[in-house]
Amino acid sequence: MFTNYLKIALRGFSKHKLTFFINLFGLALGLWAAILIGLWVRSELSMNRTFADNEQVYRIMEHQRYGSEIFTTTSTPGILAKELKEQYPEVEKAATYTWNEEVLFVKEENRHRLNGFYAGEDYLHILQYPLLYGDRDLALSRKSHVVLSSEAAIRMFGKTNVIGEDITLVETEGESSFIVQAVLAPFSSDLSGKFDYILPYQFMFDKPFNTWLQQWGNNGPNTILKLNPSADYQVFSKNIQDFIKERNEGSNVTLFAYPQADLYLYGKFTDGLQQGGRIEYVRMFSVIGIFILLIACINFMNLSTARSQKRAKEVGVRKVVGAERGALVGQFLSESLILSVFAGFFALLLVQLTLPTFNNITGKSMSIPFDEFAFWVQLTTIILFTGLVAGSYPAFYLSATKVVSVFKSHMKSGSTVVWARKGLVTFQFILASILIVGTIVVYQQINFALKQNLGYDKDQLILIELDGKLIDNFDVFKTALDNNPGVVSLSRSTHSMMGRNSNTGDVRWEGKDPDFSSLFEIMRVDYDYLETMGFQLIKGEDFSRDRGSDSIQGAILNRRAYELVTQDHSEAVSFTLWDEDRNITGVVEDFHFQSLHQSMEPVILLLDPSFASQAYAKINTADIEKTIASIQNIAENLNPDFPFTYSFMDENYARMYNEDVRTRDLAKYFSILTILISCLGLLGLSSHIAEQKTKEIGIRKVLGASTFSILNVINKEFISIVAISIVIGSGLAYWLVQDWLSNFAYRINFSWWFIPFAAGIILLIAYMTVTLQALKASQVNPVNSLKSE
């Protein structure tokens, strides 16, 4: 029987080549998009979930209360892990680990900046990265040990088996020698946060200037732990809530444990509650993938039902000779399944060809898992689902054809079928409208974020990493650059302007409500910082060398901070920071040091560049390359042991929106694909409508109808449907994008022109698609179309 179904299907495909091509290409494009999105979703859902005993691993996080707001962070005190392990028997392993840093490693002639962090002895027992060489127990057991990634080992030594080899860490304060005790296997694609090295946390903890790590009131590192298999993490989380409050009087911190595996997808918290995160993008693109596949299936349904008159006699004859309805349903479903299989292979080929580009857009390194049985099961399921959905309506509709109607030539598309077909086309273009409008909004919001006035001038602003002798000889470095005609100004700071770095709630002022607190960002800067960054001074004065101690003991606030400090006492001229009185010497306009996802925060600028690790140079545009080369030459002469490292602040700022830009680009490409598939369906339908109206068009031409009026005969069938779809889809899009825009503290308004612009695009493409077939039909000689009469 299947052989018979296959022969009938192939015969039908060869007889109706245009319909076959449209169905095949449409389903292939739909499956292509579905497979690509499926691979991305699969990658996202599996991220950081492959570690052994992953279900026992938890991050310790903080809820910090400031007035009516709760700020959630992964930063914790540097001594928390050790204390939790000692105090709670359910804690099997616990480790502190720091933020990532780029540091200079040297091995003979090889000098490379590597990116990594410091971690406690238990770290590799909690997150069990596969080892290429070495002993997990020894890896971080001493201050003189270091763990390298396989890639870092090759860069430094030219090989991976380097256990027992020594390597030198070069820092501003001196050199330290380490012994390689473990080399990690190459990172798998389902791990985020790749790195080059891990150094012992104790090495950092024991540095004289890191005594703040020993204080319960200071945060910075992360705390990760592994609970016993029998432990209930929710009970444990409840038990540790007041752990810091009991050790730090007046603390506003509530601790809680959170599954490490969930942080990647569910890492966004608002007012102490988990709300969204990357999982929102996973859901959004999953829905887009389903939409695109449904649109492709709708094309198949529409074209199949449009051909119902041509297949009616075939069905009638088969029924006369005794075919059951079930057999007919099986035949039509088998045709759609066979077509889906062909489309599936074609889609797989497209995926293989386009996956490198898709990886580049998404920032991933995915591949088709041909060797995984689960992948083939999932692919087969998608193909079967597509075939059954696409073929279901035509199968049950055609199999219900009445024999008498067929042979009396009364077989016409009933109103039910016509309305069903119009409904499917409407649904197609509703989805297309949602995607087009959504893409326009995403584009406008990302462009708004990238071009927004940040309160400082990021253009032609260079960030220079300070290390080695550049820190001690900064004044010499500054003098040399001040004499460089390409450099407008130079200063330094402890802050990267790329997110929160250092902050405190220990700020008091006259008249402050004891129950009120706010989180202030602290920036330690040097002279000329305001000029270099382009901050707008709205009150008072900048830090000045002429005022000496007044500047050192003073502070400059941003508008938000000044409004808080003076809210209860408008004439306030000072405040207390960490029990030390500070005079307000100046006020600057608010500026963004985070992405526009976050609201403007209060900032305190202090004249204290002693720990500044970044210099900012404002350069002119006359000859940027020559100016940078000159800066590099000066830096390398003053600091020959360290490579010169710089970046442009506008590029650094843009990197904060990498995920949003990827969302924008993916939405753009999938919107184009949606329109393409929808218009393929219109092309096929308009072809069939033109074929059905051949005699009507012939009569109209004989009676002197113009080409334009003939075009309207076919166009009116579709343009009104598309217009209705745009109205409905635009309304739904408006509702959906408001939810997405709510993720931004600073966002665009939904402008009136978004919908007409999207409508214009869709209507133009739809009109051109239908007109193509209408023009073809209008050129047919009426003699040929009417000769059978």
Image (spheres, rainbow, N blue to C red):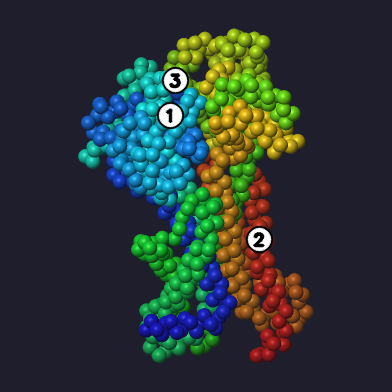
Q: First in sequence: mark 3 or mark 2? A: 3
In the image: residue 589, left or right of residue 414:
right
On the rendered structure, is 755 left or right of 92? right
Q: Amino acid at mark 1?
A: Ser
Can residue 209 be seen? Answer: yes
Q: Name the kind of residue labelled 2 in the image.
A: Leu
The x and y percentages for residue 270 are 45, 34
Q: Are marks 3 and 1 in contact (CB under 8 Å)?
A: no
700 versus 597 height, above or below: below
Mark 3 = which residue?
A: 209
Per the image, the residue denoted by label 1 is 176
* Residue type at tag 3: Phe
Decide which of tag 3 and tag 1 comes sooner along the chain. Answer: 1
Residue drawn at 63 percent across, 43 percent down:
447
Kindly identify the residue that appears in the image at 26 percent across and 33 percent down. Answer: 91
As helix, strand or loop, the secondary structure at mark 3 comes to helix
Looking at this view, is 211 or 508 the one in front?
A: 211
Residue that label 2 marks: 763
